[in-house]
Image: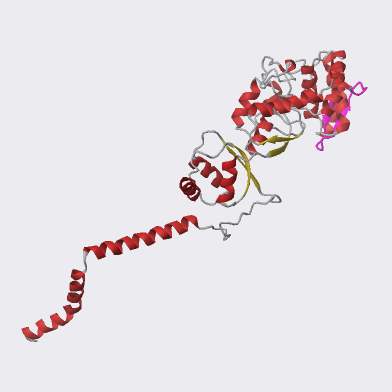
Amino acid sequence: MSADDKKTLAQKILSPFMELRDMFAEVSPRFVIFVTAGVLFCVLIVGLVLIFADPTGKPENVSIHSDFDENKVHVKIREGMTTGEIAQQLADKGVITSSLKFRFLARVRGYDGKMKPGTYTFSENMSDDDVFEKLMTGEKHLVRFTIPEGFGVKEIAERLYDLDLVDREDFLNAAENFAPYSYMKRRPNVRYSAEGFLFPDTYDIESDYSVDEILNTLSGEFDKRLTPEMRARAENMGLSVYDLVTLASLVEREVRYPEDRAIVAQVFLKRLKMDMPLQTDASLQYLLDEPKEDVTIEDTKIDSPYNTYQNAGLPPGPIANPGIESIEAVLNPADTDYLYFVADRDGHNHYAYTYDEHLNLVNEYR
């Protein structure tokens, strides 16, 4: 192939590329900027669509909140929380689908710093409009909770924390020295002054109650339920209100079946009269981080005033919050001469007059 032929062939191959070069050379910088801006705008729109998309597939303006919805979610908004903190808490609990979207809407609508503190009841995946409506109006509502007989302060704190009514540590710290009534005055070695005096019942309280207001409600119910007749009966038995409640808390934690309450109360009262250690596993369980099915010999050697195997008399204070039936059992004990009892695996107590009889029962039922 001659040199001219090679040159002609090269020109044919390069021709399309040369035309493309000439075309781009004619494009103005303004057009390039316009195209680039268009691409960026499209990216922005796609991003916003992804952020604001509702993964549930429900229209944004449709709220799934219903008074009959069983999936209630309690959220406590505390004083001073930022919009970001509120959004994250709502997202973590499944109330909203996007914390970023919530923050964006709050900023655009001027809600930043205006959402009111309190405890709110939401449903999962509510519309943002419904959530904002609650938070901006500071909607108050009643929260219902139940304190079972035999719950201790720690268990109450956990239940209220689960409902977002209190901070767990705030409640425990307040319970340490909470004593609005003279009979609750803090004693040496007592963990919580409030222990024993937070009456087990079902309560309806406003969602924005403080820790002190909750403690006052529960202890006030105890003070109301402990009638003048009951106080007089305790005094005639030589029991202070504090000792009455301490004994009743032991009965509450030792007994599973109602028919055993008055008998166990009699055993404890008789042992106290004889200056005999109560030797109740319930007081040992109070010392442990986690309850055990059976306490061990090593547990009975724990050095603590609450160890009723090592110390005669009552422990320093109540170990739980007894119900009215256990208080009544102490005030009206059974007429027996039993000194010992042991529970079988189903929780039924078996009683003995002597230690030898008791050992036989232990071997039989444990």
Please determine whether, in this image, residue 103 is positioned above or below residue 215.
below
Q: Residue at x 49, y 49 (%)?
A: 105
Given residues 109 and 153, the one toward you in this image is 109
Q: Residue at x 76, y 17 (%)?
A: 242
Outermost left residue: 3
Quarter of image, res 62: bottom right
Task: Determine whether, in the image, residue 205 is placed left or right of residue 357.
Answer: left
Residue bounds of the magenta highlight: 333-354
Please determine whether, in this image, residue 221 is positioned above or below residue 136.
above
Q: Residue at x 59, y 29 (%)?
A: 169
Q: Residue at x 78, y 27 (%)?
A: 322
The image shows residue 16 at horizontal and vertical percentages of 20, 78
Outermost right residue: 335
The image shows residue 98 at horizontal and vertical percentages of 51, 51
Please determine whether, in this image, residue 102 is positioned above or below residue 283.
below
The image shows residue 189 at horizontal and vertical percentages of 66, 16
Report if residue 354 is visible in the image.
no
Report if residue 70 is visible in the image.
yes
Given residues 342 and 203, the one toward you in this image is 203
The answer to if 242 sits in the magenta stretch is no
Quarter of image, res 165: top right
Q: Main secondary structure of the magenta part?
A: loop
Given residues 354 and 92, the one toward you in this image is 92
Q: Which image quadrant: the N terminus?
A: bottom left
Q: Which image quadrant: the C terminus?
A: top right
The answer to if 351 sits in the magenta stretch is yes
Q: How many marks?
A: 0
Task: Determine whether, in the image, residue 35 is placed left or right of residue 194.
Answer: left
